[in-house]
Image: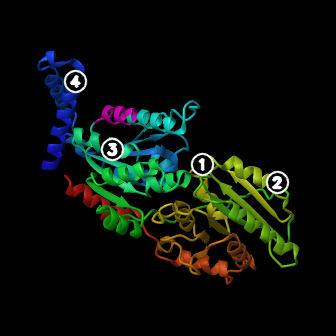
Amino acid sequence: MALCMRLQSVLLAVVSALLLLLLGPGCGLLPAVCGLAAWAWLRLRAPGAAGRRRVCVLVLGDVGRSPRMLNHSLSLARNGFWVTLLGYPGAKPHQDVLNNDKINIVYITEIMTGMKFGSKIFQYVVKIFVQTLQICYTLLKIDAPSYMFLQNPPGLPAIAVTWAVCLLRGSKFIIDWHNYGYTIMSLTHGDRHPVVQIAKWYEHFFGKLSDSNLCVTEAMKEDLRENWNIKSEFVPSDFERTAFTELNISTGNVTPIEGRPALLLSSTSWTEDEDFSILLKALEEYEGFITSGITLPSLVCAITGKGPLQDFYNRLINKMNFKYVRICTLWLEAEDYPVLLGSGDLGVCLHKSTSGLDLPMKVVDMFGCCLPVCAIDFQCLHELVKHEENGLIFKSSHDLAGQLKLLFTDFKNEKSTLGIFKRNLKESKMVQWDENWDGTVLPLLAASN
């Protein structure tokens, strides 16, 4: 608390100094008066008795495609908090969120996305500046919350701005670490690019200023502690089982073999951290198995999602000449997605963590629908996918093709390898979000009151 008050004093002094420089030395006490007036206004808007049950949840991304932050919002509301959920519009959030009287969604307009002039660095700087103003304006406009939850990444400029607003408004700042933003940037620019190095310093410096931290894996918890000197609490993502009914997917022009086609499912944001050429090459090899006389079912591969590389991969898919395999790309609302997963035979995950420390939510969703998974290998994947127990882990397209061959051989037989994986998922003790959240996050909120 003493540190917080010292930092508040520093901010007030900086504001006063800036006003003095702008207005000149002859203005007397005007800068100090203005600074103190602004300070008083903000403190009057700090959370009072009613505000102690008010929380802001911020994600600088598509609200509807941020399931973990939606789960935080639902858990907060279930425990009697009034939630303001801030983020960009896009996918429709789950109906449970829309119907909850304690959750108010406030959308932030996403601008600067089509700016064509200037260098990429200039465009990025302008975007950060505009986002800073947007976040400041939005966070200062809403009623002062007692806590602010922020999803990271993306954390630039959200971490620093949210911390500063929390400081001014007397709110507690909580970061939920999904990954490291600078590692995602390195996909485009490389590890040694100045922008990536600045982003790493920024994330490291401002990340330590939060009051509490949550994270998605045990590996990330350990990395935050050892390399960032940040204490965090591990909160597993939602594994709750989802009820579903069968969903019919058109087989299109796929040539049927005896019985129905197998249904292979994947979901993606069509970004650089997922290489779908691996899946396409594996499907080509699977087609080759059938044409060579190996007894396998025809295959329908449904890929859900939206993103920047979708058109690129759609062009590749359209050029492929399959007889026994059909690939379709589609977009589903939140309520329909688990229906599709529950109707599938096998899931494929191509998410390869930039930090090696996060887990793919798509696998969490698939396991929640008792759908076994083939997933590409990375550092902490074993926390989620147990090789030869609830799925298989692969390293190449050739590995994946071999796994598809293994799992789709006699795939409708409950005693097959795929059937055993499904039974293991049904019998496993799934992580319950509500129970874990109440035991981990709720005590953090109570302790900071």
- Prevailing secondary structure class for the magenta stretch in the rendered image: helix
Q: Residue furthest bottom?
A: 415
Element under disc 3: helix
Q: Residue beneath label 2, please? A: 319
Q: Who's the residue at 59% across and 52% down the image?
A: 269
Kind of residue at badge 1: Glu
Kind of residue at badge 2: Lys
Element under disc 1: loop
Label 4 – label 1 distance at C-alpha:
53 Å
Q: Closer to the camera: disc 3 or disc 1?
A: 3
Kind of residue at badge 3: Ala
Element under disc 2: helix
Magenta part of the protein: which range? 133-143
Residue 78 visible at all = no
Label 4 – label 3 distance at C-alpha:
24 Å
Which one is earlier in the sequence, the residue at label 4 or at label 1?
4
Is residue 256 inside the magenta stretch? no
Establish if 232 lies above or below 137.
below
Q: Residue furthest top?
A: 26
Which one is earlier in the sequence, the residue at label 4 or at label 2?
4
Is residue 142 inside the magenta stretch? yes
Q: Who's the residue at 59% across and 78% down the image?
A: 423
Label 1 – label 2 distance at C-alpha:
28 Å
429 or 205: nearer the viewer: 205
Q: Closer to the camera: disc 4 or disc 3?
A: 4
Q: Residue beneath label 3, please? A: 160
Badge number at residue 333: 1
